[in-house]
Image: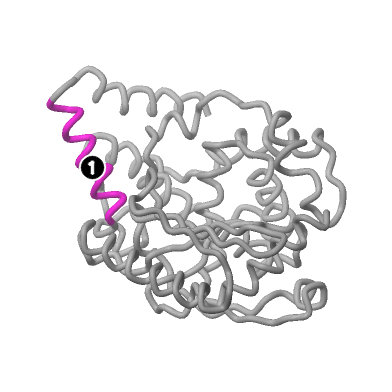
Amino acid sequence: MTDEYIATVRLLLDIAPTVFRSSLFAMKGGTALNLFVQDMPRLSVDIDVVFVDHAPDREAALAAIGAELRNVQQALQDRGLVVRLPGNAQGDEVRLSVYGPDAQVKVEVNFVFRGTVLPVHAQPLVLSAQDLFTTNVSLPVLAPAELYGSKLVAAMDRQHPRDIFDVMHMLQRFGWTAEVVDCFVAYLAGHNRPVHEVLFGPAKSLEPAFTNEFVGMTRDDVPLTILTGTQTRLRHELPRQLAPRHRDFLLSLVRGAPDWPLMPFEQLQALPAIRWKLQNLATLKKRNAARFGEQESLLARGFATL
């Protein structure tokens, strides 16, 4: 673990309680997994935030997120930190950047995938991190199964070394659990890319990001070959973990008529990301029926190869 990454996490832990003062925010992503679930196998330098209330519409949610982040900005500036909050959302996220004397931390709130499928709970910093950073904080964090369900979508989509590393530790500690796979399917259903592309897309090289965006983050050195092996295992095993009900649900989703009872989450159909996905599919069906039909045929073809 390099001094640069350690300084960044020190700043992250210093500002995190201010970020999560609001009951509307909870933590997800690599920081939640590696500092609050696993025993700090690697450091993580961003704060990924979930807006936990799925009920407000997009404009109301953006307004609430903006108001909360402005409160965070003011509180941190009052402490002498430099904080930048762009006026407009970038992609699917609203970002706030915090600058300390020797580090920078990004706080990113996803305003598309709002809400959760499992209850949020307060989680203390793991002991290894408490010892290293001589601090202890307890923050609202998504349930481990939901954290990993979301992480699996990222790992299948981006195939970044950090995500593959997190999957490796999930498999070592938990294996493939039914609850994680359920959460993966839920997050896959709300993902912005076609389902078949995430499940059956080509492998991506880990090498470019390995040196520049991964080395120096981990407690123990991890060779690229180990991560590549985990990537291969992930891409082979995860699609095969999908039960018939998962496959049927995803096929019904891409047809634009989700069979909701196939999934265990009552609020799934109310999540904005999935409503947005269905709206986009309906638009595609009107504009290009052939491409719309391919969503189902390519997904069914992928399942048939398993």
Is residue 192 visible in this depiction of the protein? yes
> Residue 99: horizontal and vertical position, in percent?
60, 61
Q: Which of 162 and 275 is in front in this view?
A: 162
Question: Which residue is depicted at the point 51% across and 67% down?
Answer: 27
> Residue 180: horizontal and vertical position, in percent?
53, 57
Question: Which residue is depicted at the point 30% across and 21% down?
Answer: 294
The secondary structure making up most of the magenta span is helix
Is residue 1 visible in this depiction of the protein? no
Residue at image mark 1:
278
Q: Which of 208 and 298 is in front in this view?
A: 208
Dividing the image into 4 quarters, which one contains the N terminus? bottom right
Question: Which residue is depicted at the point 73% across and 81% down?
Answer: 135
Kindly identify the amino acid type of the residue bearing the numbered disc 1. Answer: Leu
Q: What stretch is highlighted in magenta?
A: 272-286
**Compared to 99, does 89 lie above or below?**
above
Question: Which residue is depicted at the point 51% across and 26% down?
Answer: 201
